[in-house]
């Protein structure tokens, strides 16, 4: 039996516009989402902001009722059996909400253990184990207000594990973390998956999905546009090379001119400090460089490199260059 089964899940919202003459329209947040997650699998839901990742997770964690379709967690329907589903799942979201800052990390865990109906003998044993797992042992008596964002997020994970759930939902857990904190959190997530927890991770960081997930579903505009292993997804762009051109300002009309070239498949622009890096996907590889330089004549150009495509490049092709 799969840990999670999702069939044609759908969610609509009603939006009201106007002041004098008010009109109501339906907004589709999730249109048609289907996938299965095996027990013990670390599964990624990857997509740009607004693609439907968080809405999907809220339906699976019983926080939202689907407008259509169905989903089961460990064989239990998320609508009909919601009260049976909740004790068997844990939900960790990005950001800093959900903790009491004036309490210590230890007191937070004791409080939430009581809310989860974890008996005192079990919580006394489990809390030190969880503090060890998330790397907060020795800091548990400090107030949460003195924790870094990464430490607070790791405390979130410990809180979600108090009742020993079988399935974990991580909704963009590294959002807003510095590189060191994000790396530590990813290590914690890997350790959890090694302990045979089933994990659904939502993210819009391609490198994070590539490093952690066994399979990835790419969602865009409420629909799954691809589902496979990171390696298989990369095969979708093996016919291309990527030419990266470092620039110091590029007009939009020049970008459009390059996009119109017959050997160019996709163009994306990435801002890095005071620079811009134009990434050109093309089957021509290094042979494309002279033509690109000719079209960039008059602009200040830094280094130019050619590289093999990555999961990020596959993602750009799948979602059509949607902003993250």
Image: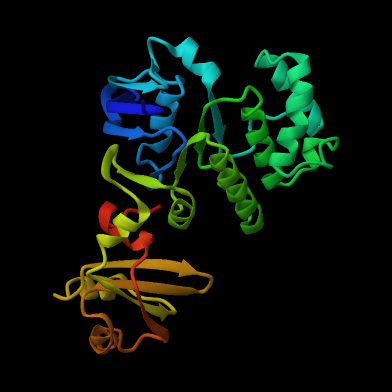
Residue 127 horizontal side relative to residue 199, left or right: right
Q: Considering only vertical position in the picture, is 275 above or below 225?
A: below
Residue 278, quarter of the rendered image: bottom left
User: Is residue 102 visible from the viewing direction of this image?
Assistant: no
Q: Residue at x 56, y 46 (%)?
A: 190
Residue 238 horizontal side relative to residue 177, left or right: left
Q: Nearer the viewer, residue 165 or 305?
A: 165
Residue 243, quarter of the rendered image: bottom left
How many numbered discs?
0
Residue 35 horizontal side relative to residue 184, left or right: left
- The location of residue 172, given as percent across then percent down, is 51, 42
Q: Considering only vertical position in the picture, is 72 above or below 39?
A: above
- The location of residue 188, given as percent across then percent down, is 62, 45
- The location of residue 53, given as percent across then percent down, is 40, 37
Residue 255, quarter of the rendered image: bottom left
Locate the N terminus and report the quarter of the image it occupies.
top left
Q: Nearer the viewer, residue 132 or 260?
A: 132
- The location of residue 154, given as percent across then percent down, is 67, 40
């Amino acid at each position: 039996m799969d840990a999670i089964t999702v069939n044609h899940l759908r969610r609509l919202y009603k939006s009201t516009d106007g002041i004098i003459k008010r009109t109501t329209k339906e907004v589709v947040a999730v249109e048609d989402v289907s996938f299965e997650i095996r027990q013990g699998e670390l599964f990624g839901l990857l997509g740009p902001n607004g693609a439907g990742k968080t809405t999907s997770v809220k339906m699976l964690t019983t926080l939202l009722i689907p407008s259509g379709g169905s989903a089961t967690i460990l064989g239990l329907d998320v609508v009909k059996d919601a009260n049976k589903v909740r004790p068997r799942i844990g939900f960790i979201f990005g950001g800093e909400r959900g903790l009491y800052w004036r309490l210590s990390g230890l007191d937070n865990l004791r409080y939430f253990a009581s809310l989860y109906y974890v008996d005192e003998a079990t919580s006394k044993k489990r809390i030190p184990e969880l503090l060890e797992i998330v790397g907060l042992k020795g800091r548990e008596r400090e107030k949460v207000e003195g924790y870094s964002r990464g430490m607070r997020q790791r405390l979130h994970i410990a809180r979600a594990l108090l009742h020993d759930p079988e399935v974990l939902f991580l909704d963009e857990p590294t959002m807003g973390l510095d590189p060191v904190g994000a790396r530590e959190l990813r290590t914690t997530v890997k350790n959890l998956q090694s302990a045979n927890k089933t994990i659904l991770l939502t993210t819009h960081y391609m490198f994070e999905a590539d490093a952690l997930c066994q399979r990835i579903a790419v969602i865009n505009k409420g629909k799954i546009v691809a589902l496979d292993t990171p390696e298989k997804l990369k095969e979708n762009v093996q016919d291309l090379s990527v030419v990266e051109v470092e620039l110091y300002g590029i007009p939009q009309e020049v970008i459009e001119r390059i996009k119109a070239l017959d050997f160019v498949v996709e163009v994306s622009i990435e801002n890095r400090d005071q620079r811009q890096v134009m990434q050109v996907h093309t089957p021509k590889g290094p042979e494309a460089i002279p033509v690109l330089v000719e079209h960039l004549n008059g602009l200040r150009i830094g280094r130019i490199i050619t590289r093999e495509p990555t999961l990020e490049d596959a993602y750009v092709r799948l979602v059509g260059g949607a902003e993250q």
